[in-house]
Image: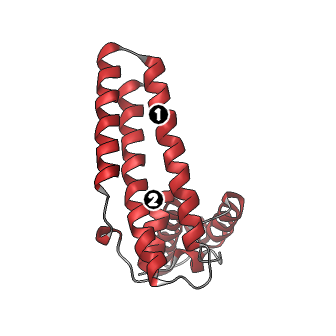
Amino acid sequence: MRDYYALFSLPRRYTVEREALTAAYHRAQTIAHPDQTAFADEESKRRAINESALINEAYHVLKNPVSRVRHLLQIHGADLAQGRLSVSFLEEQLDAREAAENALQNGDQTRLNDLLNALRRASLQRQIRLAALLDDEHISREALRQAQNIALELQFLERFADDLDEKSGL
């Protein structure tokens, strides 16, 4: 597995400064972009295309909070799929989905906005907790275990918010 943090010379932590990531991405693409090899042999062009694709993938992974935590966990030998969602979290989400369906059926835009805002707040809370666990240079096994569970919750919340966005047209 390729370490996308190393590709951009960024510290290996959950919190990524957007400006630093974007600047590193642009620097890397300036060097590796296939246009730089317009007059080179076919092998050099192929390598440039592959390197540019890798840089694009790395940028998109590190830019997204869910894919970033998944990548960071993998670097540390942990797997998001080994995390567990608590029964209370699942019950809360079932209640929220039911409320969203009711609001959609009734055309209640105010309720939909409230639900979407609550999802975004919950997502941000998970991101803050992940930063607290994964921004240290040395991450304990227990921190990784906790991060797996929180990352699953974050993934769930983000998907729910995306679904609600799409269905409601907000």
Between circles 1 and 2, the one closer to the viewer is 1
Image point (54%, 43%), residue name: 121
Tally of marks: 2
In the image, taking residue 4 as reference, residue 149 lies left or right, namely left
Look at label 1 and name its amino acid: Leu
Image point (39%, 25%), residue name: 168
Q: Earlier in the sequence, mark 1 or mark 2?
A: 2
Q: Which mark is residue 77?
A: none
- Tell me the distance, in whole angstroms, between the alpha carbons under discs 1 and 2: 18 Å
Q: Which mark is residue 116?
A: 1
Report helix, strand or loop for mark 2: helix
Report helix, strand or loop for mark 1: helix
Image point (54%, 82%), residue name: 139
Query: Closer to the camera, 151 or 38?
Result: 151
Q: Quadrant of the N terminus?
A: bottom left
Look at label 2 and name its amino acid: Val
Where is mark 2, residue-wise? 66
Question: Residue 79 location in percent, x, y?
Answer: 35, 74
Question: Residue 86 location in percent, x, y?
Answer: 32, 58
Query: Closer to the camera, 3 or 165?
Result: 165
Question: Residue 129 location in percent, x, y?
Answer: 55, 62
Query: Closer to the camera, 104 or 38?
Result: 104
* Residues at marks 1 and 2 touching, judged by CB atoms closer than 8 Å: no
Is residue 38 visible in the rendered image? The answer is: no
Is residue 132 visible in the rendered image? The answer is: yes
Q: Quadrant of residue 62?
A: bottom right
Question: Residue 87 location in percent, x, y?
Answer: 28, 54
